[in-house]
Amino acid sequence: MKASNKDKDLGKCDIKYLLTDSRKLALPEQTLFCAIKTEKDDGHKYIQNLIERGVTFFVVHDIPKEVNPKQAFFLKVQDPLSTLQAIALYHRQQFHIPVVGITGSNGKTMVKEWLASLLEKHCSVVKSPKSYNSQIGVPLSVWEMNAQHDIAIFEAGISQPDEMERLQKIIQPTIGIFTMIGAAHAEYFTDIKQKISEKLKLFEYVDTLIYCSDHTEIDHQIRSDKHFKAAQLFRWSETKPDADLYITEKKIKAHKTKLTALYKGTSIQITLPFSDAASVENLIHCWAFLLHYGIPNATITQDMQTIRPLDMRLELMEAINGCSIINDSYSSDFNALQIALDFMMQQHQHAKRTVILSDMLQSGRSDAMLYADIAKLLVEKQVSRLIGIGQAISEQASQFPMNKEFFPTTERFLSDFDFDSLHNEIILLKGARVFAFEKISTFLQQRTHETTMSIDLNAMQDNLNYFRAKIRPQTKLMVMVKAFSYGSGSYEISNFLQFNNIDYLTVAYADEGIALRNCGIKTSIMVMNPEEYAFAKILQFQLEPEIYNLRTLMLLVNKINELPDIAHVYIHLKLDTGMHRLGFTQDDFPALLKVLQQCPKIQIRSMFSHLAAADNPAYDDFTRQQIASFDTMSSTLSAQLGYSVLRHILNSVGISRFPEAQYDMVRLGIGLYGVGYDTNEQSHLRNVSTLQATISQIKTIYPGESVGYNRNFIASQTMRVATITIGYADGFRRALGNLRGSVAIHGHLAPVIGNVCMDMCMIDLGDIDAKEGDKVEIFGNTLPIQNVAQWCDTIPYEILTGVSHRVKRIYYN
């Protein structure tokens, strides 16, 4: 450990927080930063910034040259990730409480959250935050254990062999739950047997392993594994009478499931508040654990009725008075608050930040210590206003230095609070479920249209990482956010991209770029279609116009001459290599260079061209010809400019199909939003946008009766027809009517019948079990947008960008 010029005794420092992502810094004085290098990034790049923000303690491989080693304490190690895991391992060894380890392909997080919710009524629980189950997430989770906890619940996930041993050493579970096995990450394992064996390594030293023996592959693998004895196994089953918990009867009624089972020779019953197979299986895992743990079945039955669906995501949406809401009422603990505040910090569209926070239950800490740390966290995250709801937080009011108000209950808040005082700010709702913050969310939401488009920022992150992995580390990334970010939202997506250190954003028109600047976006922005009237604003807001001919260049020169205070202007030159839409040709170069020489304030930031048919293998020769032309043209210009210029020609499909032409930058568009150029690439991308409507009414019609305008559909038999809350004014194309298109309900397709109306349309329910108020998917995970585009004889771009602005966008993370 190196000495620092600060008068601190390292042996007396109090490290409370481990950090691996510099963007999520909370309390710098008590933080140890581990500079981990991954395929995506290198934590060493952010050390100087963290020192400037107050962090003193670092685990590093090397001290960067720009960092003064006397500014902080540095522990130099071979592998910072291994050191992080070793710290967590040592911390884990200080505790001798039951530790539950959960793994499987699906259901890990749901089982963990529901089990923690059921146990919190009886003891103090620590659990993994959100889905922290990776090589980095697990040590961060285990670090949260403290002396006040009675039981710990941690999930562990792996994507390839030889990962679970490290997680097992950190978690050291005493009780295991194996949820199920699926196809995720199958490409990294030779077969399902190897995948199960790798996951089972988490449980090699557990006292008890709980699993469903109806999963044949899992059951066979466990029974043949030498590490497990019969006495260690707690099996539940719907088909095997010798199971420890044998389900003898299952009845589903009114979206609930009543189970009868044999346990220790006695018949017991329980009612689960769900009817879908996945939720029922996840809750039976919890039931089996609680029985094994010694909680009476009568108590479990009563507690189960309090279980609610877990929406494990942070939702961002528009609110009243120009505000935005982040709704996160699914979990109330310090880690979850920090995660929500990190998401809040990504949003730059509002200067003011308000947090509505309930009492934090079952923290295992004294109220004074807990709310002191919460107050420090709110200050660090630049929260300007706190609204506290609950007795405990109200009693700690003096701890909070910002503007503040307190209410004893949610009902009192809704009745007494002046909602007009909320104006143009970002509002985080963070409350324990018992405080029913959904009532506050409903009150604050600006739009109540039941047609919504949900944008999954986690899926977008995965898609971004997929394309980043395809480019060289030094290759810059420009992302298209034109046309309302392909219908997904402008500043919300741009905030996400800025948070992920994108090099450039691209908009179609200056107005879009100005709106982003007004919402706090500082990333460089290229404007593809700079109109004459907009050049003054382009210069004012430091936007960078695309210049594609001499006319647009002269318009810019004239505006620069009118504004003598302008020091320099960055532009992007468009070259025409065969698309023949916009761009300079080789014949334009003499006149172009002459103008540039006469106006030295103009500096070319990049030269680029547009591939016309990169997605069509039949035209690969033409695409390569375009690339060769671009190489010649850009090289000729660069040689005469006297300074270096970025070059780029690849779009989303080009990144995948022509990696040799990366040059200095690539442009990512539709691929970010989850649309691949072929089935192979599509299998690696995640759907980002889900458009949903709601069933307004269901009715029965009879043979000979018509549906919709102009009686274009006549029933040939008795049928159930549902009217749903979407029409062509929402972006649901009229071409989808009259049995040409379908929507998805509970995983089943229902054809659209009759003409599509402005605000609604009708569908044939057939035998689908649906009721009024149910959600209907227009496109998303069940019904790919490519299918909808095909029905309309168009492309996914047009479907995405055609979703009306009146449709409420919800962003979740």
Image (cartoon, rainbow, N blue to C red):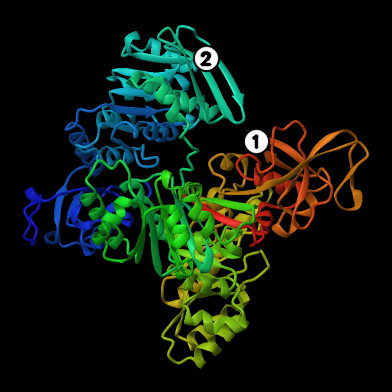
Residue 701 visible in the picture? yes
Furthest-right residue in view? 704
Q: Residue 728 placed where, x, y %? A: 75, 57
- Image position of 275 (left or right of 496): right
Amino acid under disc 2: Glu
- Image position of 550 (left or right of 132): right
Q: Classify 307 as above or below 669.
A: above
Q: Residue 27 placed where, x, y %? A: 24, 56
Residue under circle 1? 746
Looking at the rendered structure, the number of numbered marks drawn on it comes to 2
Disc 1: CA contacts within 10 A as few (<14), some (14-19) or many (>=20): few
Q: Classify 544 as above or below 233.
A: below
Residues at badges 2 and 1 in contact (C-beta under 8 Å)? Answer: no
Disc 2: CA contacts within 10 A as few (<14), some (14-19) or many (>=20): some
At mark 1, the secondary structure is loop
Q: Residue 298 placed where, x, y %? A: 42, 22
- Image position of 198 (left or right of 640): left
Residue under circle 2? 238
How far apart are the alpha carbons under marks 2 and 1? 24 Å
Amino acid under disc 1: His
- In front: 399, or 113? 399
At mark 2, the secondary structure is loop
Q: Quadrant of residue 160?
A: top left
First in sequence: mark 2 vs mark 1: 2
- Image position of 493 (left or right of 725): left
Q: Quadrant of residue 601?
A: bottom left
Instruction: Specify the label residue 32 is tagged with.
Output: none
Q: Residue 740 placed where, x, y %? A: 80, 44
- In front: 629, or 727? 727
